[in-house]
Amino acid sequence: MNTSMSEEHTLLVTSARQLAAAHLAPRAAEIDQGILFPQEAIGHLAQAGFLGLCVPSRYGGVGAGTFAFVLATEELAKACASTGFALVTHAAACEAILLGGTEEQRQRYLPALATGAVLGAFAIHEENAGVQAAAIETRAVPDGEGFVLSGSKMFTTNGGAAGLFVVLARTENPGAPKEFSLLLVEQDTAGFSTGPPRPRMGLNGIASRDLIFQDCRLSRDNLLGKAGDGLRLTKATAAFAMLGAAATSLGIAQAAFEASIGHARRRSIAGQPLAAHQAVQGLVAEMQADIASARALLYETARGWDPNAPGPAAQAFTAKLVAADMAVRVADRALQVHGGHGYTRELPIERCYRDARGLTLHFMTAEMLRMNIAQALLAA
């Protein structure tokens, strides 16, 4: 598979790497341990145009495409996984509006999202539904010229920082078949609030919050696409988000790998560098093979990304499944290379492990990914 990049993509990666080294890496540990949202880093991403990478220029974005988004996310996540993942969720909100929004909605919301004036979030998960979108209970009851939104969401990335939320809700009339729709909810909507932060194992900087909707009145203009389009748009948006999640996992794995190479070269035992030990060499070789395989799959999927083509969801789900599982294996081997030093908070390896483990759960668990992939492959 060809993982080579054009000159434009090479420049993008260089820019992302420089930005990450200057503004993300120095505060990554502080953000993780202090459970802080990387607001300053997000500001730098906005200034560099990264928040609008996939937004067409006519809406104020860069219009660089999905592959560019994946490349940038990988580099940013290598320095700070929380910042990279916050970008992914923001980009998913933009993608939902691009896929399902009217021209008026795109003109209204995308310029602010693309420039970073507003941060986006995508809210699906609920206490009694998990990642099964069709089981959600949040309801938007038709009322006159709009809806009354009631219910809650949980574990919403960017929940404590976003200004615009793309929310999946049931919109059927009483007695009608189940109907699901996406609604745009602004942060200052009356009746809308967010819960407190929850202590987490990793990815501590993503401002994950529960969302509470208490009789929020929304106009018809807040409906994304048509009533009943919710599940279709959610699946297409989720597939795009999976590519970003896979890129985040890839960035984490690359960071752990590079740290292991450096440690093996510097650290000596009984006068001999770790790099000279066959056991360490085997671990490093396995890490390289894992990363290269996942990167090739992700890049191939992102290069040809077309949300309207047959089968893109299964391809994106596969890339996310492979990359997330790979990152955990690589982080685990990196811990072995570092020994007891890697288990302390003096080095970033333990954070890599915790962050990598979170990516096997976020957006869709590994088990749900496998089920969705199998269903797509076995469908008549």
Image (spheres, rainbow, N blue to C red):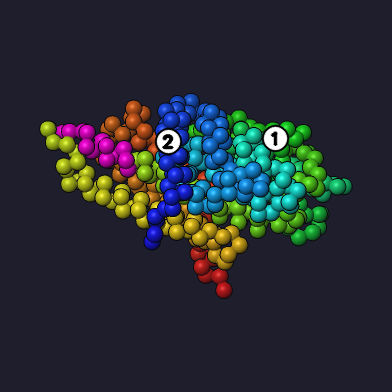
SS class, disc 1: loop
Per the image, label 2 sits on a secondary structure element best described as helix
Q: Name the residue type under label 1.
A: Gln
Tell me, yes or no, whether the two marked residues, 1 and 2, touch with CB atoms within 8 Å.
no
Q: What residue is drawn where x is 70% and y is 47%?
A: 106
Q: Describe residue 242's horizontal placement relative to residue 325 as left or right.
A: right
Say which quarter of the image contains residue 331: top left
Q: Which of 58 and 287 is in front in this view?
A: 58
- Quadrant for the N terminus, please: bottom left
- The residue segment tinted magenta is 257-270
Given the image, on which type of amino acid does mark 2 rest? Gln
Report the mark closest to the observer, 1 or 2: 2
Q: In this view, does 252 lie above or below 224?
A: above
Instruction: Name the side, left or right, on which 336 lies relative to 203.
Output: left
Visible residue check, residue 354 = no
Q: Does 63 sit left or right of 260 as displayed?
A: right
> On the rendered image, what quadrant is the C terminus found in?
bottom right
Magenta stretch, main secondary structure class: helix
Q: Which mark is residue 374?
A: none
Comes first in the chain, label 1 or label 2: 2
Q: Give the labeled residue for mark 1.
A: 187
Q: Position of residue 212 (x, y in %)?
A: 69, 37
Name the spot of residue 66 as percent of width and height, x first. Answer: 53, 52
Please provide percent x and percent y for residue 340.
27, 32
Q: Residue 18 carries which label?
A: 2
- In the displayed orientation, state which residue is furthest to the bottom: 380
What residue is drawn where x is 38% and y is 44%? 253
Left or right of 308, for residue 183:
right
Q: Can residue 40 be seen in this view?
A: yes
Residue lying furthest front: 7
